[in-house]
Image: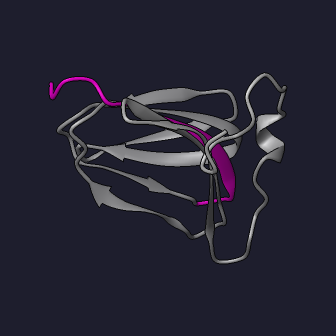
Amino acid sequence: MNDHELEKSKPYIMVELVEYIPNAIVVKTILKKSTGVISVMSFEMGEGLTEKISPFDTFAQIIEGNAEIIIDGTSFLLQTGQAIIMPAHKPNLVKANVRFKMILTVIKSGYE
């Protein structure tokens, strides 16, 4: 097992893999390969990811709470159970107006 991955062939409750920490974002890597990464993250209220442009599509699924995800200047308010694909080559950022948890999946295919 890779130190950066969870043990395989074992069930997990995703929302329990990370806790909230005041004034912080917590990241737990589920699976990390040269072809992509899956992480579960917790965001305390007021925290966020700064605007960036990725060469790959990124899939964000909210598993607890509500998140604001801004893609190319358009704001999307996502609730528990909702997901969005942040397209490659478009600026995006993630904001925690309230605390929340999400699963983030990046598949590194050819540069699109």
In which quarter of the view is residue 49 placed?
bottom left
Quadrant in which the C terminus appears? top left
Q: Is residue 60 above or below residue 109?
A: below
Which percent across, then down, holds residue 85? 40, 28
Residue 109 lies in quadrant: top left
Residue found 84% across the figure and 26% down from its top: 11
Can residue 99 be seen here? The reply is yes
**Magenta segment:** 97-112
Tell me which residue sits at (20%, 40%) in the image.
90
Determine the residue located farthest toward the front in the rendered image: 1
In the picture, measured across the screen, residue 95 lies left or right of residue 15, that is left
Q: Residue at x 83, y 32 (%)?
A: 12
Magenta stretch holds residue 109:
yes
Q: Position of residue 110 (x, y in %)?
A: 19, 24
| Nearer to us in this view, 54 or 98 | 54
What's the coloring here?
one colour
